[in-house]
C-alpha cells in the first residue's frame, strides 16, 4: 500500500481522544503508580493486533512491550515512551491538569508534552500500521516504561528481562517540536550536606550556622568552570541547584543543611571526575554523595543512515528543512541505546521547553504530524 494511502487513515478525532484519555489517567511520580495506565495501553495495543506483554514490577508499576512482527530480515526498531509524569506543582493552572482540555489547537494537561503526546502518537501509528497489514523487514517494538523521570527504572527492567535484545535502533518520543535530536546530555545528581552547631537564635556566636556554610559552598560553584568546549549539538554542561533544606526552628541556629545538585554533562566528560572536582571545592565543610547512578550521555552519528532517514521523514511530513539537534535532558535512550549499543534519535511533537511547565500542552497539528512521522519512519527504516 502506498505511503499516502496509509497516512490518510489518521483520524483526528480518535487520535485526540486517545491522548485525552492518557492524560486523564494520573501517573505523577511520586507516588509512582503507573499500573492503571499501563493496563489501558496494553489492552489498546492488543486490540490493535500487536503481540503485547504487560510487565508489572513493584506494587503499582509496570512496563509494556508490544510488537508488530516483521519478516526477520532486519533488527527490530524500538519506539520508546514513558508513562510517568512529574507532579503538577504549586502554581495554579488555567485548566484542570488532568482533564485533557482542548483549547485553540492545543491539548492541555500534565503529560501532554512529556510525554503522553509522543506515546499516544506512537500508539496510533502502530494501530494504523497493524490494521494496514504493512509488511516490515524487522519488528516494530513499542517499549513503554514506568519510572523514567527519576531513575530510568523501567528501562533497566526491560534490559535485564532481555525483552529488547534483537533491537537495532531506538526512536524516543520526548519533546523536540518535531526536530530530530541525535544526542542528549548525561545527568549526575548529587546530595550535599553541611554541618554546624545549634545555639539560641539570639546568641548565634555560640553555634555554627550550617545554612551559611552551604551558602558559602553554593556561591563557589554557582559559576563552576567545567573546562570543556561547547558540544556542537548540546552546547555547554550545566549545574543547577534543585532543592535546599535546613534548620529546625526560627530561633535555633541550624546544625544541618542539605542541597541537591543537578549536573548535566557532555559525552566527553567523566561523571566521576566531575564529582571529584566538586567535592574538592567543598572541602572540608561539605559532605557530598552521588544519588543513584549517573545517566550517561547519548550520541549518535548525525550522518548515519538511521539519522538521515529520520531527517528526511520529518522534512517530508512538515514541509520544512530541519537541522540535527541535541537534547538538554536525558531519556530512556540513556539505558536502551547505551546498553544495547544501538543508534538513537529523539523526535516528539511538543515544544522542548514545555517539559515540566504549568499549563503543559501539545499543539494538535504537531501531534497529528508526529503520528505521520512515526508511521512513515517505521515503513522507510524497516523497508516495507
Image (cartoon, rainbow, N blue to C red):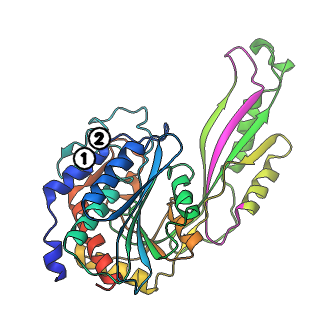
Q: Tell me where residue 376 appears, x and y as whole percent.
A: 27, 76
The residue sitting at 32% across, 48% down in the picture is: 40
Which quadrant holds the N terminus? bottom left
Stretch in magenta: 248-271
Q: CA distance from mark 1 to mark 2?
A: 6 Å
Q: Is 258 within the magenta?
A: yes
Please report contact status of discs 1 and 2: CB closer than 8 Å, yes or no: yes
Left or right: 133 with respect to 113? left
Identify the residue position indicated by label 1 in the image. 20
Q: Is 295 within the magenta?
A: no
Q: Splitting the image into 4 quarters, where does residue 13 fall?
A: bottom left
The residue sitting at 50% across, 50% down in the picture is: 149
The residue sitting at 38% across, 77% down in the picture is: 323
Q: Which mark is residue 251?
A: none
Q: Tell me where residue 258 appears, x and y as whole percent.
A: 70, 35
Q: Splitting the image into 4 quarters, where does residue 69 fall?
A: bottom left
Left or right: 195 with respect to 16? right
Q: Splitting the image into 4 quarters, where does residue 67 fall?
A: bottom left
Q: Which mark is residue 24?
A: 2
Q: Secondary structure at mark 1?
A: helix
Amino acid at each position: 500500500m502506498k505511503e499516502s494511502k496509509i497516512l490518510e487513515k489518521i483520524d483526528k478525532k480518535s487520535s485526540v481522544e486517545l491522548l485525552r484519555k492518557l492524560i486523564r489517567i494520573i501517573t505523577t511520580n511520586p507516588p509512582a503508580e503507573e499500573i492503571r495506565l499501563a493496563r489501558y495501553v496494553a489492552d489498546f495495543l492488543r486490540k490493535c493486533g500487536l503481540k503485547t506483554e504487560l510487565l508489572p514490577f513493584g506494587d503499582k508499576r509496570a512496563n509494556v512491550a508490544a510488537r508488530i512482527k516483521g519478516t526477520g530480515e532486519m533488527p527490530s526498531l524500538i519506539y520508546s515512551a514513558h508513562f510517568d509524569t512529574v507532579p503538577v506543582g504549586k502554581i495554579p493552572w488555567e485548566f484542570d491538569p488532568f482533564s485533557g482540555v482542548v483549547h485553540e489547537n492545543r491539548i492541555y494537561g500534565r503529560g501532554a508534552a512529556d510525554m503522553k503526546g509522543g506515546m499516544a502518537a506512537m500508539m496510533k501509528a502502530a494501530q494504523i500500521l497493524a490494521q494496514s497489514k504493512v509488511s516490515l523487514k524487522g519488528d516494530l517494538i513499542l517499549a513503554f516504561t514506568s519510572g523514567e523521570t527519576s531513575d530510568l527504572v523501567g528501562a533497566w527492567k526491560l534490559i535485564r528481562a532481555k525483552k529488547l535484545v534483537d533491537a537495532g535502533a531506538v526512536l524516543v518520543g520526548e519533546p523536540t517540536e518535531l526536530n530530530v535530536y541525535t544526542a542528549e546530555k548525561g545527568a549526575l545528581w548529587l546530595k550535599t550536606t553541611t554541618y554546624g552547631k545549634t545555639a539560641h537564635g539570639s546568641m548565634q556566636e555560640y553555634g555554627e550556622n550550617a545554612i551559611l556554610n552551604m551558602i558559602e559552598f553554593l556561591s563557589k560553584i554557582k559559576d563552576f568552570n567545567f573546562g570543556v568546549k561547547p558540544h556542537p549539538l548540546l552546547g555547554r554542561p550545566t549545574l543547577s541547584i534543585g532543592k535546599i533544606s535546613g534548620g529546625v526552628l526560627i530561633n535555633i541556629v541550624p546544625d544541618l543543611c542539605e542541597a541537591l545538585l543537578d549536573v548535566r554533562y557532555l559525552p566527553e566528560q567523566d561523571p566521576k571526575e566531575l564529582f571529584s572536582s566538586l567535592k574538592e571545592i567543598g572541602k572540608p565543610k561539605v559532605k557530598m554523595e552521588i544519588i543513584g547512578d549517573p545517566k550517561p550521555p547519548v550520541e549518535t552519528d548525525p550522518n548515519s543512515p538511521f539519522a538521515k532517514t529520520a531527517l528526511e521523514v520529518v522534512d517530508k511530513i512538515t514541509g520544512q528543512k530541519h537541522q540535527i539537534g541535541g537534547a538538554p535532558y536525558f531519556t530512556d535512550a540513556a539505558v536502551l541505546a547505551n546498553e544495547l549499543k544501538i543508534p538513537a534519535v529523539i523526535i516528539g511533537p511538543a515544544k522542548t521547553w514545555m517539559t515540566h511547565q504549568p499549563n503543559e500542552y501539545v499543539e494538535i497539528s504537531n501531534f497529528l504530524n508526529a503520528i505521520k512521522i512515526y508511521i512513515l519512519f517505521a515503513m522507510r527504516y524497516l523497508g516495507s
